[in-house]
Image: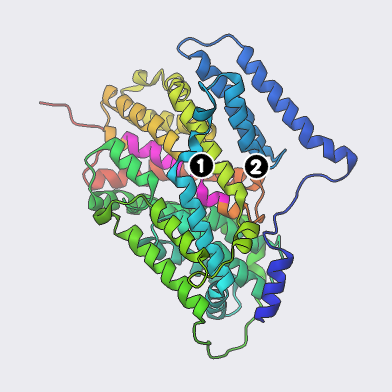
């Protein structure tokens, strides 16, 4: 069985699907789309600069429109779009020079991604992924829904051991690819899409429940201020539990045909002892996780343990991968898309473009001071276009939370609640893969298209609105964080 699995992996290594039309006519469609979006960008640059927006900000916005359009339509490969936007930032004058356009390639998170994906590749190549996949497949009893529920319940449990959603996704995507392959589920089946969409969009939400769960909770808590680890858990566990449950149920409804199939059962046998490769992979993975969990003591950036794991896994005699395997099977598109999107986020912030957009959208907010729910509703509605425009969650949070909190203060609302509301509205959704490293991990495997991710992002936008209004606000009121602050005596 191992030989057949390895053969299937070699034949469909990354198995990225090419959805573009074939033939002479179809070959022109990506080129035409690219020229149309480039033309739109130039038109936006030539438009009179709006009041309050710098010329550099206008040009960065034009480049952002082009890049987001190309990422969403998949007119050209995502990594090529990333390099194109770096060049466009320089040529348009959106950034002072080439070093500023490449700033995202110096961000630690880009190299954290390399380490995490290498761990996932090692889990696959060592045989650990197949071992874990067989375990889940046998426990499912041939029921697709049971396999799906096992995965969902593993998200919050694994978040305690591996707080980073990117780390979990980088490992689990290989595990469930193996499980579905062993269960003889064909590629493109609704069940495959359901599992991959859950890994793409739902898995991330389990991390934000913990203050140490990633950049989103750390940055949001820092911007809001005065929130301890325990208080954060108390504030987030119910809203994010609701998002996890509703998002998972939505995926089931959208792909319910896939849950009617039966998985091929595996013969019951006694598991073989762990091989030397599996033991080394497990030791390196657990050691890396231990360093991530103890960062409060050593204060290392999470990228450092990830890169140390990368070195160990590629070192002869210690690791389990050869350089050729890494070079061939690593999804390099992830690195280029993430790094370039960070450059774009920095440019939007530095030019003042993101702040200008947020201020324009919420300019009329103080007029709604007597309608607290209306203020929150407008904040949530404003969050969607800002999240669509800003590819990086860091840029989104840094832009929206301070403005939302200031609006809350002006209208007599609790600034903490306003900040948390826009955080949930942005964190719960993904409109295109470049908005999340964990999403890029799944997207690179070719199971989901950008259009499918975008459509689910729209559904999650609606769910996020409902959870904030109907679940989070009443819950926060009950635990001592009311929406409207009492007037000072």
Q: Residue furthest front?
A: 316
Q: Is residue 83 visible?
A: yes
The majority secondary structure of the magenta stretch comes to helix
Displayed quadrant of residue 359? top left
| Residue span colored magenta | 418-440
Q: Position of residue 48 (x, y in %)?
A: 58, 8
What is the crowding at mark 1: few (fewer than 14 residues within 10 Å), some, or many (at least 20)?
Answer: some
Colour approach in the figure? rainbow
Answer left or right for 170 relative to 415. right
| Residue of label 2 | 78
Does the magenta segment cover residue 386? no
Q: In this figure, what is the number of numbered marks?
A: 2
Answer left or right for 472 relative to 33. left
Q: CA distance from mark 1 to mark 2?
A: 27 Å
Q: Position of residue 159 (x, y in %)?
A: 39, 60
- Residue sitting at x 62%, y 83%: 266
Answer left or right for 17 relative to 144. right
């Amino acid at each position: 069985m191992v030989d057949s699995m390895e053969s299937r992996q070699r034949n469909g290594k990354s198995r990225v699907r090419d959805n573009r039309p074939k033939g002479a006519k179809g070959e022109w469609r990506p080129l035409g789309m690219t020229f149309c979006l480039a033309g739109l960008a130039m038109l936006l640059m030539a438009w009179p600069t709006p009041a309050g927006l710098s010329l550099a900000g206008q040009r960065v916005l034009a480049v952002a429109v082009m890049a987001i359009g190309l990422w969403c339509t998949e007119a050209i490969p995502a990594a090529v779009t990333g390099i194109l936007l770096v060049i466009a930032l320089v040529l348009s004058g959106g950034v002072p020079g080439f070093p500023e356009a490449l700033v995202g390639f110096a961000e630690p998170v880009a190299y954290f991604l390399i380490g995490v994906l290498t761990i996932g590749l090692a889990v696959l190549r060592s045989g650990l992924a197949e071992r874990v996949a067989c375990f889940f497949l046998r426990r499912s009893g041939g029921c697709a829904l049971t396999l799906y529920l096992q995965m969902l319940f593993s998200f919050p449990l694994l978040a305690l051991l591996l707080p980073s959603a990117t780390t979990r996704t980088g490992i689990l995507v290989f595990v469930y690819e193996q499980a579905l392959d062993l269960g003889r589920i064909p590629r493109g089946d609704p069940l495959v899409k359901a599992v991959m969409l859950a890994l793409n969009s739902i898995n991330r939400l389990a991390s934000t429940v913990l203050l140490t769960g990633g950049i989103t909770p750390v940055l949001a808590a820092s911007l809001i201020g005065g929130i301890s680890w325990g208080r954060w858990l108390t504030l987030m566990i119910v809203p994010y539990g609701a998002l996890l449950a509703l998002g998972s149920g939505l995926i089931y409804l959208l792909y319910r045909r896939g849950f009617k199939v039966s998985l091929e059962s595996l013969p019951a046998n006694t598991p073989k002892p762990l091989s030397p490769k599996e033991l080394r992979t497990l030791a390196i993975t657990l050691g890396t996780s231990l360093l991530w969990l103890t960062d409060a003591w050593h204060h290392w950036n999470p990228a450092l343990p990830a890169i140390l794991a990368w070195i160990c896994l590629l070192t002869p005699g210690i690791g389990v991968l050869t350089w050729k395997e890494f070079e061939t099977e690593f999804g390099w598109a992830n690195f280029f898309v993430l790094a370039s999107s960070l450059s774009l986020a920095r440019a939007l912030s530095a030019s003042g473009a993101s702040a200008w957009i947020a201020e324009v959208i919420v300019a009329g907010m103080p007029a709604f001071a007597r309608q607290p729910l209306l203020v929150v509703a407008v904040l949530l509605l404003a969050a969607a276009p800002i999240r669509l425009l800003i590819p990086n969650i860091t840029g989104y949070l840094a832009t929206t939370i301070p403005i939302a909190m200031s609006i809350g203060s002006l209208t007599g609302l609790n600034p903490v609640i306003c900040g948390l509301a826009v955080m949930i509205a942005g964190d719960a959704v993904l409109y295109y893969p470049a908005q999340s490293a964990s999403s890029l991990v799944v997207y690179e495997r070719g199971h989901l298209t950008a259009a499918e991710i975008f459509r689910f992002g729209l559904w999650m936008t609606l769910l996020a609105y409902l959870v904030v209004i109907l679940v989070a606000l009443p819950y926060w009121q009950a635990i001592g964080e009311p929406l409207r602050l009492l007037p000072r005596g």
